[in-house]
Image: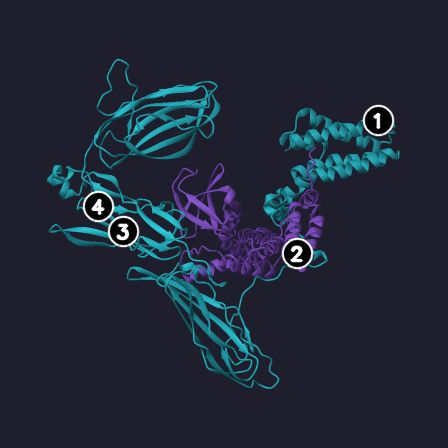
């Protein structure tokens, strides 16, 4: 005689599995990191910027990856005239939260102090408008948003199966609309996550970094970039990085001269 | 590129081309797998650059030593390296193996200075256990007239440190020259004794008449600023140019010329003559605010209005212009301005040539806010510099500027934002740190730990469609159970049977034999009824047996069915009193029978 696992039992098993997996997201050292962060804030407020940046570094070593931490650390470094490092940490803060106006302001302000002015590639108003929408959320928010739409769409369609009359039609339309929204937003989300995972950036930390035509000191010197200039990393060759500027120029720079975002 | 070949020991070194050595040895324990040498050309003209490449393949990435190459004395040598890697995957008998190799190219860029026949080599490569002679090659160099001539000059032979000196490199080209390139590493050529700035953004081609012929000429104009006192040498600047190989133009056929098959080009280098400059140190006694400006300077100061109200801003614009080192013009020190609140200036500036001199202009706009009414003066603004013509430190000064300050509005606080003007940025700064609250929202997060890096995320993503399809399945099943009676009965037959057998078992355990056999009879009759959607209760034993046999039941199952029902009837209606063992046996028989029928009637 055959005995089937009931539908309810299946649901219960799935929920148990989810509940069991959830603790994997927890990080127990964030309490200590938060304490170090507050210590850094106190040092900053009393003008001890070196102590502040040391405390922020400790918070980061304890496992925190928070835009506020990188932003504050950038501020502490900026106050110590460590412009390249300040830009590096503002860039890291922006990577975690591209929507924070304070991060964007301080990054722009610090960049205005750099020697190298690299013009961005020109773009039309439509591209700029789309880009501003694309920049208005973080990768984390994008991932959760996509998952929420996905689940909501299926939930609406599942509910419609058991509803009747106008409610059924409304739920079907709602489910379709949610999937349409997911379809429209997925290119932006996918591109954001792709860039977040694959596109690395580097900031010049030395007063001057030499960009060469190949991964070695023997190659031709192409140009020099100064502290704070930000590159996109194209490739890696041992202790050399193949990098590119927004205006298209590129070359090889030694890892020791830059910090990776 | 021609590959060198191993020279036969008995043969003389041939004048043709390429000799060479190719060694391919796989030393089991060595990092180097192979090495070979190749030469770009064996017939060149004087000044033409050609390439000798020694390619070394190793089994791992290492900084390999340079090869030993003899016979390079007649050439100007420039060296560089290039690296690359490759991997190879092989499948033999289903076994996949992968090997990596790392290639290092040692590149010698050679330029012959004199005509003649030269031998490049022997070329040897040695590293750890690997040691090979890669051969040698003959190179024939013929004399070629230079495609360009250069004449370098400086505007003066003696200058003060920081004083502008005009450097001009005049290039006269022949028609055969196709392009001219300045060295990319110009700063390296100029050295650390000079700051320089090109006067022209692009080197313009002009024509000039030389010996009655019109020829292309170029002028490279540079403003040089010596940085260190003492004798300074500006090394000869190499000018690389591409020209049609001598004799190639004449040999071109009419078809080549018509179809645009260009004549072969060669790259040659001409080196401008080095120049010497005696740099005189600046004398002692520089003013405390001297910033290194040497040359001719002027300063202008102006106010955007001569009358204002207390608390209303006025703008003091200071413009400094000079021909010294562009970066030496810094923010001037303003005189004491009692009664004014002074804000940091907004700075702007440009550098542009006028004739053969580079002039730099920088403008500083200060916002001043008077706090007292009355007639007052903005004192003279000055900027110190060293005048080489006078050999002394002097000051460029502005005239004092009179300001009439009227009373401000009663109770008004002096502010740069008063006066109905648009709010102006007086300075900039970074925004303050984020304090973070003391509660849960102030706790740091691990935002780098993105959700999709966890299996939970994908599990949740998978859960949604799984739940939907489960709901769809349930919905369809419910619909069918409601509309398809036969399927509904068949689907529910097993559940109904379990309930009936449970009733029978309870009756048996409580010793109620009649109830037990009634429940058992009910179960045995109802199960095939449900399975086949046919009522068995009204049938005779033989009809029921026939119906079962027709639906695929085995004869022994039909017989057992018949026997079991007869026994149930005997107990119920003939007054038999079965023992507990008999009841248990009958229950087991019924379960076995119904399980068989479940399969046979499927």
Q: In the structure shown, which secondary structural element does the residue marked by tag 3 occupy? A: strand
Residue at point 41%, 52% (across, down): B227
Residue B96 drawn above or below residue A15 = above
Residue located beneath label 4 in the image: B149
Q: Colour of chain A?
A: purple
Residue located beneath label 2 in the image: A48
Residue B555 drawn above or below residue B182 = above
The mark nearer the N terminus, 4 or 1, is 4
Q: The cyan chain is which one?
A: B
Is residue B259 found left or right of B431 in the rendered image? left
Q: Which quadrant would residue A101 be assigned to in this image?
A: bottom right
Residue located beneath label 3 in the image: B153
- The local crowd at label 1, few if under 14, some if 14 to 19, many if 20 or more residues have their Cα within 10 Å, is few
In the image, residue A244 lies at what x, y percent?
Answer: 43, 47
In the rendered image, is residue B538 in sight?
A: no
Q: Looking at the image, which residue sits at the far top?
A: B10
Residue at point 25%, 34% (across, down): B113
Separation (CA) of disc 4 from disc 3: 13 Å
Q: Mark 3 lies on which chain?
A: B
Q: Do the residues labelled 1 and 2 touch (CB within 8 Å)?
A: no
- The local crowd at label 3, few if under 14, some if 14 to 19, many if 20 or more residues have their Cα within 10 Å, is some
Nearest to the eye among marks 4 and 3: give it. Answer: 3
The mark nearer the N terminus, 3 or 1, is 3
Q: Which chain carries label 1?
A: B
Is residue A212 found left or right of B6 in the rendered image? right
């Amino acid at each position: 005689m055959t005995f089937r696992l009931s539908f309810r039992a299946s649901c219960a098993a799935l929920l148990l599995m989810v509940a069991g997996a959830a603790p994997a997201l927890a990080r127990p050292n964030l309490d200590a990191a938060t304490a170090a962060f507050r210590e850094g804030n106190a040092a900053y407020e009393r003008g001890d910027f070196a102590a502040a940046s040391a405390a922020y570094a400790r918070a980061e070593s304890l496992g925190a990856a928070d835009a506020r931490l990188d932003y504050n650390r950038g501020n502490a470094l900026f106050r110590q005239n460590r412009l390249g490092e300040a830009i590096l940490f503002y860039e890291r803060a922006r990577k975690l939260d591209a929507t924070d106006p304070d991060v964007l302001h301080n990054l722009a302000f610090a960049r205005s102090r750099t020697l190298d002015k690299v013009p961005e590639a020109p773009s039309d108003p439509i591209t700029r408008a789309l880009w501003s929408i694309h920049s208005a959320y973080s990768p984390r928010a994008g991932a959760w948003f996509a998952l929420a739409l996905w689940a909501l769409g299926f939930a609406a369609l599942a509910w419609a199966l058991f509803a009747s009359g106008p409610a059924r039609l409304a739920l079907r339309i709602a489910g379709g609309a949610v999937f349409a929204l997911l379809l429209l937003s997925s290119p932006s989300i996918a591109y954001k996550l792709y860039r977040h995972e694959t596109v690395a950036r580097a900031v010049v930390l030395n007063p001057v970094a030499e960009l060469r035509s190949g991964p070695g000191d023997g190659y031709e010197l192409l140009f020099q970039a100064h502290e704070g200039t930000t590159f996109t990393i194209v490739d890696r060759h041992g202790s050399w990085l193949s990098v590119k500027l927004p205006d298209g120029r590129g070359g090889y720079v030694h890892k020791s001269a830059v910090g990776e975002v | 590129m021609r590959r060198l070949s191993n020279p036969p020991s008995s043969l003389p070194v041939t004048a043709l081309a390429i000799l060479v050595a190719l060694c391919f040895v796989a030393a089991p324990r060595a990092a180097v797998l192979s090495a070979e040498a190749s030469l770009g050309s064996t017939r060149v003209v004087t000044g033409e650059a050609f390439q000798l490449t020694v390619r070394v393949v190793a089994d791992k990435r290492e900084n390999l030593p340079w090869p030993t190459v003899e016979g390079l004395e007649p050439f100007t040598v420039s060296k560089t390296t290039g690296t690359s890697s490759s991997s190879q995957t092989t499948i033999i008998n289903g076994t996949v193996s992968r090997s990596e190799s790392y290639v290092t190219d040692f590149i010698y860029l050679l330029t012959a200075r004199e005509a003649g026949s030269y031998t490049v080599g022997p070329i040897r490569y040695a590293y750890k256990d690997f040691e090979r002679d890669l051969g040698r090659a003959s190179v024939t160099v013929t004399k070629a007239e230079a495609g360009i001539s250069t004449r370098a000059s400086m505007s003066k032979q003696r200058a003060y440190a920081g004083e502008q000196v005009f450097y001009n490199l005049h290039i006269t080209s022949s028609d055969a020259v196709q392009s001219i390139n300045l060295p990319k590493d110009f700063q390296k050529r100029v050295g650390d004794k000079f700051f320089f700035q090109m006067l022209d953004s692009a080197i313009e081609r002009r024509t000039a008449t030389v010996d009655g012929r019109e020829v292309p000429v170029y002028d490279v104009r540079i403003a040089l600023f010596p940085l260190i006192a003492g004798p300074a040498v500006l090394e000869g600047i190499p000018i690389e140019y591409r020209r049609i190989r001598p004799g190639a133009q004449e040999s071109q056929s009419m078809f080549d010329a018509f179809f645009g098959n260009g004549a072969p080009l060669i790259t040659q280098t001409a080196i401008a003559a080095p120049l010497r400059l005696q740099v005189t140190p600046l004398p002692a006694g520089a003013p405390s605010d001297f910033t290194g400006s040497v040359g001719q300077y002027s300063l202008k100061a102006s106010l955007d209005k001569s009358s204002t109200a207390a608390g209303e801003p006025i703008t003091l614009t200071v413009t400094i212009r000079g021909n010294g080192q562009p970066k030496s013009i810094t923010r001037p020190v303003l005189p004491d301005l009692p009664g004014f609140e002074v804000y940091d200036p907004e700075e702007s500036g440009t550098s542009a040539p006028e004739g053969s001199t580079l002039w730099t202009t920088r403008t500083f706009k200060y916002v001043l806010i008077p706090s007292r009414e009355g007639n007052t003066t903005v004192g003279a603004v000055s900027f110190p510099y060293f005048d080489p013509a006078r050999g002394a430190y002097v000051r460029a000064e502005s005239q004092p500027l009179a300001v009439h300050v009227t009373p401000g509005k009663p109770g008004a606080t002096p502010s740069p934002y008063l006066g109905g003007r648009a709010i102006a940025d007086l300075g900039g700064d970074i925004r303050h740190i984020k304090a973070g609250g003391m509660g849960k929202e102030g706790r740091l997060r691990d935002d780098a730990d993105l959700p999709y890096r966890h299996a939970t995320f994908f599990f949740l993503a998978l859960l949604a469609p799984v739940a939907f399809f489960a709901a769809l399945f349930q919905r369809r099943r419910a619909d069918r159970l409601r509309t398809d009676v036969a399927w509904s009965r068949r689907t529910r037959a097993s559940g109904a049977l379990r309930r009936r057998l449970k009733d029978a078992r309870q009756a048996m355990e409580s010793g109620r034999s009649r109830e037990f056999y009634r429940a058992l009879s009910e179960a045995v009759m109802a199960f095939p009824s449900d399975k086949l959607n046919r009522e068995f209760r009204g049938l005779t034993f033989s009809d029921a047996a026939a119906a079962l046999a027709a639906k695929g039941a085995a004869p022994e199952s039909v017989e057992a069915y018949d026997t079991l029902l007869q026994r149930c009837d005997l107990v119920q209606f003939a007054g038999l009193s079965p023992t507990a063992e008999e009841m248990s046996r009958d229950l087991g028989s019924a379960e076995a029978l119904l399980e068989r029928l479940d399969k046979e009637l499927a």
